[in-house]
Every structure is written in C-alpha cells, then in structure tokens.
Amino acid sequence: MAELLQYLFDALSLGSLYALAALGIALIFGVMRLVNFAYGDVISFCAFALIVPTTEAVSRMMLGALPTPLLIVSVLAVGAGLSIALEWLVFRRLRHANPATTMVAAFAVGFVILNVLLALHSSRPKSVDLWSPLNTPLNLLGARVPALQLVTIGIAGALLVGLVWMLRRTRVGLEMRAAAEDFSMARMLGVRANRVILVAFGLSGALAATVGLLMITKTGVADIRMGGPMMLIAFVATVIGGLGSLSGAVLAGFLMGFISTLLQALLPMEARPFRDAFLYLAVIALLVVRPAGLFVTRASTQRV
C-alpha cells in the first residue's frame, strides 16, 4: 500500500508539472495556431531571473532576499512580461505568415534567449538553494513523500481551477474559448484579437515561470538548457491531447507523467536509463490509433 501511494504521488507530481507546461503551449496554439518552440527557453529565462550573473559554481540569488510571496510574483511577472514582449515584437508581425515562417521564428527566438543566458551566465550549471526544506520527505500512510510533491500537486490544482473559472466566468475567458474554437469567426463577432492574444501569452509566460520555479526547487540546479526537455514533453502532450484542446493538453500531461512513472517502476534496472525511449514508443502507439489526439477540436483542423 505504501509503495503504491509512493508511485501515485510521484506520478501526480510529475504529471502536474507536465500539465502546466502543456497548458502554456496549448493556450498560445489555441488562439494563434502557433507552436511556441521558444517556450522551453522562457522557462530557463524565468529560472535564471533569480540569479545574479556570476562565474561561481554557487550563484547568489538576485531575488532571494525578497519575501516568498513577492519573489513568486516577481518571477511570474518576468515570465508574463517576456512572453508579452515576444508577442509584441515578433509574433504579432507574423500573425498572417505561413506556418513554416512562424515555426522558424519561434526557434530563432528560442536561440536568442538561450544565447542571452549563455552570455550572462555561461553554460555551467548553477547551484541554487531555493526553498530546499520542501524536499524534506513527509510520512503519509507509510509513504515518504517530499513536501515539494504535495506543493506541486496543490499549485497545479489551484491554477487549473482558477483557469477554468477564468475561461468560464470572465469576458476575456469567453473570448479565448471562442477564439480557440474559430478565431476568424470570433473576430467577426467582435472579439478583440490583440487583447485575447496578449492575455494568452501572458498566462503562458506565467505558467512557464511556475514550471521554472518548481524545477529549480526540485533539482537545486539552474541550467540554461533546463527548459528544453520540458518543452518537448509539453509539446508531445498537446499533440496527444489534441491540438487546440486545453483540457486535452492537461489530461495528456498527467497521462505522460503516469506512463513515465509506471515505466520507471516496471522496467528492469538495466533498462531504466532508456525509459524515455519506451515512453515515446507508447506515444507513437497512441498516435497510430488516434492520429488527431485524444480530443479533436475544430482548432485541430483549422488554421487562422
């Protein structure tokens, strides 16, 4: 029983992280049909916003002296501000461009962010002590669960509930839902495209900042490439969930977390280093059966 609970909390925690990242990508795709391949670098940028540029192995925290609520708000503002700036400076001018053009632009933006971080911090990983007591295990019904896992699950749950409320109860949320279904028709009916897109980018950036904070708290290490693998998992989750489906992206993120944890538990010890290969084999099998993803929406088959 204790071992089962251990795996359950591991899966929920990892799935929560994947779900938040996938939702950040799905929000932008829903309103712009843009797969933001710079998303992983936004995650890395938000993590490094905590750090003073230095060549030392252990970096001094730029925001570490701030009270925790103010620190969180500051990092979320960095993520939202960076994403909004990218939309205003780059993606707004490519709104009606060929999808291949916007894809290349997203890759280029990611490389620019990566090289800015490289110039400021070098390629050497930085050790960062951020809320390390959260990694202390707690005894829950015989299972030793790090407090950070409970925090991650709680944050994901709160953010998802808040986002659902916003999408269903606020004007901008209704406009985002309409835009995700049929952006062209939504604009014809009076939806203000610029506002909806800016809100989507801002929320996506705030989610990236949340993922960055959780990752750096869990590992204690900031690396300029730390967001890349997370972006790849998040993108795969949005495809599995059905491009354009926000709920599908979230559920697929949790599904990826559960499959990854299950493979870690069931694979022989010598095969565990190749867990990701087995994970992507499962993804291939799922897409062969459901090429359009688990949840098919009009956004999956339309382009603005």
Image (cartoon, rainbow, N blue to C red):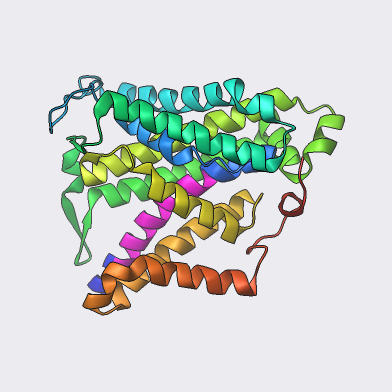
- Residue closer to the observer: 93 or 1: 93
Q: Bounds of the magenta span?
A: 7-23
Please state if 112 lies on the left or on the right of 293 as rendered. Answer: left
Please state if 128 lies on the left or on the right of 272 as rendered. Answer: left
Name the image quarter holding residue 181. top right
Determine the residue positioned at 38% across, 24% down: 73
Determine the residue positioned at 27% across, 68% down: 273
Determine the residue positioned at 77% across, 38% down: 183
Give above or below for 304 relative to 3: above
Report if residue 125 lies within the magenta region: no
Quadrant showing the N terminus: bottom left
Q: Position of residue 236 (x, y in %)?
A: 52, 57
Residue at the right extreme, as displayed: 188
Name the image quarter holding residue 266. bottom left
Give above or below for 172 relative to 88: below
Q: Position of residue 303 (x, y in %)?
A: 76, 45
Q: Position of residue 112 (x, y in %)?
A: 44, 29
Determine the residue positioned at 66% across, 49% down: 244
Q: Is residue 225 visible?
A: yes
- Residue closer to the observer: 266 or 42: 42
